[in-house]
C-alpha cells in the first residue's frame, strides 16, 4: 500500500514538473532596447495581448505560440523586430515523461505557456522616408 502512495506522489510531482505554467508562469519579462537612441515608443504584440513601453524598458508579456512583434518609433525613425517563441526547457522535460505530464504539456502548448521568447530584443531605428509631395496640377 505504501508503494502505491509513493507512486501516486511521484506521478503528481512529475505531472507538475511538466507544467510550464506552474513553474515559469504564463508571462515573461523582456528587455527592450533601441538603437541608435533611447526614448522610443514601443508596442509589443502577439495573439495574447498588446503592451506599450518607452525604451529602454522591461516589459512583462503573456507568452503565446505566435511571434511577438516589437515596433518602436521616435522622431521620424522607426523599426520592427520579431521574436519567435521556442519551447522552454521545463516543457521539454514534461514532454519527455511518458504518460505523465501529457495533460499539462497539452494545456501549456495550446496556451503558449510552454514557449519562451528571447529575454532581450534590440530594435534598430531607421529614418523613415516621407512620401514625396504630389506635383502641382499643370496650369493651362
Image (spheres, rainbow, N blue to C red):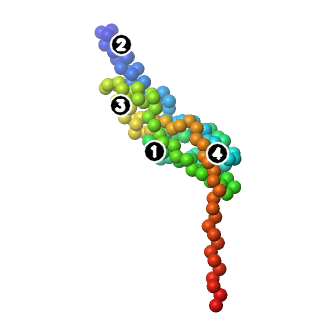
Label 3: which secondary element? helix
| Mark 2–mark 1 CB contact (< 8 Å) | no
- Which is more toward the observer, 33 or 41? 33
Which mark is nearer the camera, 3 or 1?
Answer: 1
- State if disc 2 and disc 3 touch (CB < 8 Å): no
Q: CA distance from mark 3 to mark 2?
A: 21 Å
Residue wearing tag 1: 66
- Residue drawn at x 69%, y 55% is 75
Q: Is residue 103 above or below residue 54?
A: above
Q: Are marks 4 and 3 in contact (CB under 8 Å)?
A: no
Q: Secondary structure at mark 2?
A: helix
Mark yes or no: residue 55 visible: yes
Q: Specify few, some or many for label 1: CA neighbours under 10 Å numbering under 14, 14-19, or 20 or more.
A: some
Q: Alpha-carbon distance for marks 4 and 1? A: 22 Å
Quarter placement of the N terminus: top left
7 relative position to 125: left or right: left
Mark positioned earlier in the residue sequence (2 or 1): 2
**Measured from the top left, where is residue 38 in percent x and y?**
69, 45
Return the mark for residue 6.
2
Residue corresponding to mark 4: 34
Q: Residue furthest top?
A: 2
Q: Earlier along the polypeptide chain: callout 4 or callout 2? A: 2
User: How many C-alpha atoms fall within 10 Å of the one at disc 3: few (<14), some, or many (≥20)?
Assistant: some
Which residue appears at 58% of the width and 41% of the height?
A: 121
The answer to which of marks 3 and 1 sits earlier in the sequence is: 1
- Tag 4–tag 2 contact (CB < 8 Å): no
Task: State which quadrant residue 93 falls in.
Answer: top left
CA distance separating discs 4 and 2: 52 Å
Residue drawn at (65%, 56%) of the image:
127
Mark number for residue 103?
Answer: 3
Amino acid at each position: 500500500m505504501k508503494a502505491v502512495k509513493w507512486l501516486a506522489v511521484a506521478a503528481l510531482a512529475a505531472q507538475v514538473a511538466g507544467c510550464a505554467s506552474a513553474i515559469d508562469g504564463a508571462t515573461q519579462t523582456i528587455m527592450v532596447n533601441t538603437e541608435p537612441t533611447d526614448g522610443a515608443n514601443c508596442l509589443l504584440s502577439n495573439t495574447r495581448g498588446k503592451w506599450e513601453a518607452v525604451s529602454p524598458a522591461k516589459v512583462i508579456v503573456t507568452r503565446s505560440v505566435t511571434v511577438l512583434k516589437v515596433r518602436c518609433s521616435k522622431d521620424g525613425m522607426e523599426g520592427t523586430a520579431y521574436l519567435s517563441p521556442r519551447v522552454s526547457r521545463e516543457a521539454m522535460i514534461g514532454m519527455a515523461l511518458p504518460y505523465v505530464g501529457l495533460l499539462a504539456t497539452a494545456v501549456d502548448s495550446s496556451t503558449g505557456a510552454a514557449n519562451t521568447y528571447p529575454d532581450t530584443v534590440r530594435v534598430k531605428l531607421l529614418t523613415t522616408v516621407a512620401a514625396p509631395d504630389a506635383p502641382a496640377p499643370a496650369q493651362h
